[in-house]
Amino acid sequence: MDALILFLNQLTKAEKSLMDSLDTPFKIQAFLDLVIYPGGEENRSPIEVLRQRKAHCLDGALFAATALRLLGFEPLIIDMLPDPGKDDDHILALFKVGSHWGAIAKSNFSGLRFREPIHRTLRELVMTYFEDFFNIKGEKTLRYYSRPVHLTRFDRLNWMTDPRGLDAVEKHLYQVKPIPLITSEQAAYLSPVAKRSFDAGTLGLNYDGVYKL
């Protein structure tokens, strides 16, 4: 059975109505902003996000990709990666309007979420996250990003309904060759995040879900 049809067939009437209401990328983001960002390493399939109202960044990106798919967009995600040992990576669901990219994301940090579809290239999109991508010590940590991953390659694993399929998605992301954003010389010159920006970026932060240094 088609993975998207399987997802739809498992929804209750109320769940189907909720998914139908998420009829723009911004409404998908608004839904994700309302769900809890949990601690722990558990991965949740999109249907579990819908039912548990919990999601970390991978869960949120996969849910958003599913909701975007229902609107006719390609189910694409991209991984943004930090300086190793300094922070968590962060995953975006991508969408394209015309020739320009936008993104939806679930994050513990307020600045790492929605982006309007106004960016001509993926690098241009990713760079808009640079100043907001910082760790609990206020260090700007974004260094790399991946090429887009088309989630239809995992449809045979029913990733939208079966949490076991998520492990394959996560494993694949770690195997995608990272693309550098800045040089080591530029990284050495970076300033710490200003207190006002730090306070804004950590508004509502769940410290149980923060990368531990």
Image: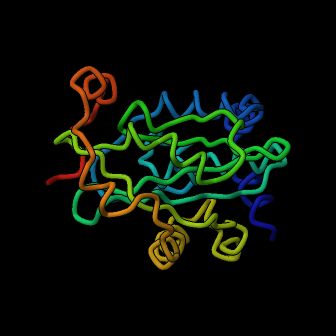
- Whether residue 153 sits left or right of residue 125 in the image: it is right
- Out of 101 and 60, give the one closest to the viewer: 101
Question: Residue 83, position in %: x, y?
Answer: 30, 61
Question: Residue 141, position in %: x, y?
Answer: 31, 51
Looking at the image, what colour scheme do you see?
Answer: rainbow
- Out of 207 and 2, give the one closest to the viewer: 207
Q: Quadrant of residue 22?
A: top right
- Whether residue 206 sits left or right of residue 60 in the image: it is left
Q: Residue at x 17, y 52 (%)?
A: 212
Question: Which quarter of the rendering shows the N terminus?
Answer: bottom right
- Out of 156 and 110, give the one closest to the viewer: 110
Q: Quadrant of residue 21?
A: top right
- Residue 49 versus residue 148 in the image, above or below: above
Number of dots carrying numbers: 0
Q: Residue at x 28, y 54 (%)?
A: 40
Question: Residue 92, position in %: x, y?
Answer: 55, 50
- Residue 194 versus residue 109 in the image, above or below: above
- Whether residue 34 sits left or right of residue 23 in the image: it is left
Q: Residue at x 41, y 58 (%)?
A: 182
Q: Residue at x 22, y 64 (%)?
A: 85
- Whether residue 12 sits left or right of residue 147 in the image: it is right
Question: Which quarter of the rendering shows the C terminus?
Answer: bottom left
- Out of 179 and 187, give the one closest to the viewer: 187
Question: Residue 144, position in %: x, y?
Answer: 44, 62
